[in-house]
Amino acid sequence: MSPARQISREVFPFLRVHTDGTVERYAGTDSVPAGFDPETGVLSKDIVISPSTNLSARIYRPKSVSEGRKIPVVVYYHGGAFIVASPAEPMYHHCLNRLVREAEVVAISVDYRLAPENPLPAAYEDSWAALEWLAGGGGKVDEPWLREYADFERVFLAGDSAGANIIHHLALRRCRSSLAVKIHGLVMIHPYFWGKDPIGLEKADGARKAMVDNWWTFVCPSNEGCDDPYINPFVGGAPPSAEELGCRRVAIFVAERDILCDRGKAYYRSLARSEGQNGKVRVELVETKGEDHIFHLFNPDCEAAAGLFDSWASFINHE
């Protein structure tokens, strides 16, 4: 390797950065086109949300939904540690097709900008911009599928890993703003929360703790490190409360063998304590035994994945 192409930082298992500034991703770069999926009967297409920032999304709907029928809206934010993946990555495209079929929803999968080319908070700002775009709802969004089929009284935010982290911050921001979009519920799958001091599984697995530390300090090299408020919701004031999220229902999915599992449970316990205080928000925890992080994406045909999608669809359609 020439001197100009020496590796300056390795961020396993996602990418490496060379001394000349080149970013070499070795995960999350595959893509599939939008279109009709015959297996699920779901249509999808790519749309532009903001030409100025090149913010786009992939939107999905059931082909069989009758004209004029209003169905729930799911705004989805993918995972990938803020550095890899997109709505067009095969496992995310298949995931959204399956969700739309099983829950019978319109889904919008947001293609936010990635670090390190676009350092945080670019991903959060793009994700917020997608909500601002959606806030022109009720027939005002210039998107035919939303005008025709979207029930703007049943809007859900959903995401896995980094995407679940994003929707936590979006919900807080929306609740403190005047943004005219009502969030009915949140679906947080294996949320990417972290912290400097190890808890639970992290104490016995120093290698994975160091790996996740490296992910976060790469995308957010702040003085707070892994206790930055973006990644650790328990710093900087009172613990997170259900009422702060400004929605009626929250579902948190965790996987028993996931290094992030204990953080997700701690987040759930914090919301559940406040749920009992105000009685306005219903908070649910769904734990999958024997599985690891985003297993439903890596092994979508397993029995546990079927259970996760069933719980997800039931949560959305529960009145």
Image: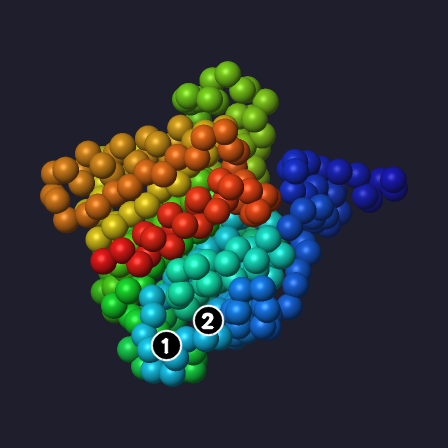
Quarter of the figure that contains the C terminus: bottom left
Of the pair 228 and 198, the residue shown nearer to us: 198
- The answer to whether 306 is drawn above or below residue 288 in the figure is below
Of the pair 291 and 133, the residue shown nearer to us: 291
Q: Amino acid at mark 1?
A: Tyr
- 3D distance between C-alphas at marks 1 and 2: 8 Å
- The answer to whether 163 is drawn above or below residue 286 in the figure is below
Q: Disc 2 on helix, strand or loop?
A: strand
Is residue 69 shown left or right of residue 62? left
Query: Which residue is located at x 32 percent, y 74 percent?
Result: 70
Colour scheme of the picture = rainbow
Can you give x and y, in whole percent of width and height, for residue 97 in the image?
A: 52, 62
Q: Are marks 1 and 2 in contact (CB under 8 Å)?
A: yes
Q: Amino acid at mark 2?
A: Arg
Can you give x and y, in whole percent of width and height, for residue 149 in the image?
A: 37, 76
- When asked about the image quadrant of residue 235, the answer is top left
Q: Which residue is mark 2?
A: 61
Quarter of the figure that contains the N terminus: top right
Can you give x and y, in whole percent of width and height, for residue 300 in the image?
A: 56, 47
Within-10-Å neighbours for mark 1: few <14, some 14–19, many 20+: many
Query: Which residue is located at x 44 percent, y 40 percent?
Result: 190
Can you give x and y, in whole percent of width and height, for residue 6 in the image?
A: 79, 39
- The answer to whether 265 is drawn above or below residue 111 in the figure is above
Q: Earlier in the sequence, mark 1 or mark 2?
A: 2
Q: How many marks?
A: 2
As drawn, the label of residue 149 is 1
Query: Which residue is located at x 30 percent, y 71 percent?
Result: 151
Query: Which residue is located at x 52 percent, y 37 percent?
Result: 293
Within-10-Å neighbours for mark 2: few <14, some 14–19, many 20+: many
Residue 122 can be seen in this image: no
Of the pair 274 and 125, the residue shown nearer to us: 274
Q: Disc 1 on helix, strand or loop?
A: helix
